[in-house]
Structures are given as C-alpha cells and as structure tokens.
Image (cartoon, rainbow, N blue to C red):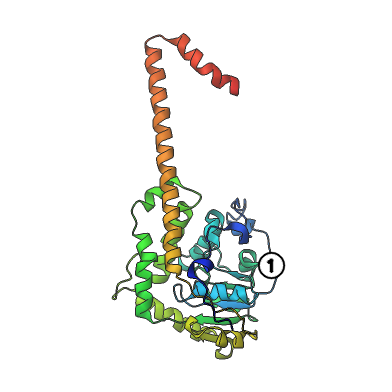
C-alpha cells in the first residue's frame, strides 16, 4: 500500500458535477397517475450489489469514494444535488408515500428507475427505505457505517442543522425552482420524517432516538451474514474482505466532507438569492415602465408611446 497520503482537497467530490447524473431533468408528472416516477423510464443497466444503509454523516462520503475506487458505480446524495428539480422531486414522492400516506409506496420497479445505472447506493434519502431496499435487492450486500451518536449529533449540528438555519429559505425557494426550491421542499419532508426535527441536533434532540431506531431497524431487517458493520477509520481491510475485493494500493479516502457540504449549500443559497434579487429588480423596472407609460397616456402622449413600442413590435 502506498505510503503517500492524499490531500483532502484533491478527493472532494464536486456535488454540482453533472457528468455522473443519469436521471432526467425535465421529467413531468404522468398524465394519468400524476406521479413523476411513472414518467421515468426503466433504466436498470447493472445489478444492485451493495446497499450502504448507515446514517448520513457517518462516513458515507468516504465510503462512496472508496466504492468508486473498487470499481463500483455508487449513488450518493451529492449526485442528485446536481439536478434536484427532478431527482429530489422523485424522492419526495417516495417520502410522501412512506411517511405521509400519499401515493403508491416504492418497490423494486421504482428503485430500478432512479437507481438503474448504479450498483451501489449510500446516504439519504435511500437509507430511509431500509426494508424496501433489502426486499427489492435480496442479492445485495449491506454495509452499515457506524459512528458514536454524540459525535454524530455534533456533526449534524455543524452541517445540516447549520445550513437549514440560514435565513430566507422559504422565500428563496419561491424564486429558484431549479435548486433552492426542490432542496427546501425535500428537506421539509425528510428531516421531520427521519429525525423528528428540522433543525434541533442538540444533546437532547429527538434525533438521538431516531439515530438508534434506524440502526435497530437495520439489525431486525438484515441477516447478520449479509451485513458488515463498518467504521471508515478501519480502512480497506474489512471492507475488501466483505466485498471479495483486493486491497487497493491507494490510501482509503480521507476527506472533510463537512466543508464540502456547507460550501455546496452556501453556493445554492447565493445562487437563489441572486435570482431573487435579479427577478425583483426586473419586476421593479417593468413596473416603472408601465407607470411611465400610464403617465404619458394621461398626458396624451400617444404618439410617443407608439414610437417607444414600435421596436418591440418589430421583434415579434
């Protein structure tokens, strides 16, 4: 194994790199069922081989990078952030069906559509479909990333909670239908459903029990011989043994995805803010033009108005 240690900066995944996104962006609700999922073509191109079901912020990004090095094509929450309008809309339908009693629950048919080009899956929102994924892909091995719950709460508080506490999300979501809108609507579904809170990850947060409940569900659902309980600090050895893979020469991925997480979402926030300011300025300008035209009309400047509008008419 190489003794060189990779730089954190060189292995950070750009969550807005769309080259690895296979899902459709302009997907529309099915004309009969009204579901986005029913307009999505079946795209299963390779068997699902690995289900990584540990909670988010337990090393799932490092595991994602490790699986890529081992030759897998994994799906991670960082990927649909590239095109959230369709991707998060699809997952929102799944959350609605499971946690809010709205629509048809997902099974293998639905998972094959959104996960079709991938042979591994990690991180939210997929991890909140433990029973469904385990039943849909009985041949897949299950990896469960582990982390101390107190450490996990601190991580959530400094990343997801920190991001969701930023001001103006509700307002920005109305102005940016491409990124901020889908992300915020998805967050309002996934956070209460799975953590029983939107922004509280303090020591006494209900998310503490939700964390334990998630791992208890995995143990009840997945046979022990099919599962690896894994801490990313353990490196390649237990992972490769479980997956029947040779240990790579490269070091196991080590990265600070907290920085990446906050950066990616701050970028989304500022883009949405710029759109809001830009659209508001445009609307203010249009209102000013309309007011000026009305004033000119009242002053019987009809000829001047016609002259102003002629270039616009010539463009139509």
Residue 86 image position (x, y, % from top left): 56, 55
User: Would residue 198 be visible to someone looking at this image?
Assistant: no
Horizontal side of residue 209 vs 34, given as left or right? left
Residue 256 seen from this side: yes
Which sits in the foreground, 257 or 82? 257
Residue occupying image coordinates x 51% and y 18%: 309
Disc 1 crowd rating (10 Å Cα; few below 14, some 14-19, many 20+) is some
Where residue 166 appears, as percent x and y from the top left, is 34, 56
User: Disc 1 designates what residue?
Assistant: 44
Tell me the quarter of the image containing the N terminus: bottom right
Q: Is residue 145 left or right of residue 37?
A: left
- Given residues 115 and 163, the one toward you in this image is 163
Residue 79 placement: quadrant: bottom right
User: On the image, which quarter does residue 141 sit in?
Assistant: bottom right
Q: Residue at x 63, y 81 (%)?
A: 138
| 289 lies above or below 128 | above
Q: Which percent across, then down, holds residue 307? A: 50, 13
Above or below for 101 versus 67: above
Point out the residue furthest to the right here.
45
Q: Residue furthest front?
A: 4
Q: Write down the quadrant of residue 87 in the picture.
A: bottom right
């Amino acid at each position: 194994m190489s003794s060189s240690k990779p730089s954190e900066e060189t292995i950070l995944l750009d969550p807005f790199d769309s080259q690895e996104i296979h899902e459709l962006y302009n997907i529309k609700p099915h004309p009969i069922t009204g579901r986005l999922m029913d307009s999505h073509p079946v795209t299963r191109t390779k068997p699902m081989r690995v289900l990584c079901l540990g909670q988010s912020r337990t090393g799932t990004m490092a595991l994602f990078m490790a699986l890529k090095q081992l030759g897998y094509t994994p799906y991670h929450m960082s990927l649909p952030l590239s095109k959230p309008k369709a991707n998060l809309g699809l997952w929102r339908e799944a959350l609605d069906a499971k946690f809010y009693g709205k629509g048809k629950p997902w099974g293998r048919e639905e998972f094959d559509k959104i996960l079709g080009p991938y042979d591994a899956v990690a991180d939210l929102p997929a991890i909140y479909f433990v029973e469904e994924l385990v039943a849909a892909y009985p041949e897949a091995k299950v990896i469960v990333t582990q982390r101390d719950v107190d450490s996990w709460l601190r991580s959530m508080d400094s990343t997801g909670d920190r991001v969701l506490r930023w001001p103006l999300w509700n307002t920005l979501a109305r102005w940016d239908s491409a990124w901020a809108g889908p992300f915020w609507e998805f967050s309002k579904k996934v956070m209460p459903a799975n953590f029983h809170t939107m922004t509280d990850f303090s020591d006494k947060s209900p998310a503490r029990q939700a964390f334990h409940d998630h791992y208890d569900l995995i143990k009840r659902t997945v046979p022990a011989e099919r599962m690896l309980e894994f801490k990313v600090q353990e490196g390649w050895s237990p992972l490769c043994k479980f997956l029947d893979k040779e240990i790579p020469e490269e070091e196991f991925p080590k990265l600070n995805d907290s920085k990446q997480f906050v950066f990616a979402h701050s970028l989304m926030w500022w883009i949405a803010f710029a759109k809001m300011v830009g659209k508001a300025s445009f609307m203010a300008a249009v209102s000013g033009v309309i007011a000026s035209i009305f004033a000119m009309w009242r002053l019987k400047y009809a000829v001047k108005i016609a002259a102003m509008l002629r270039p616009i008419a010539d463009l139509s």
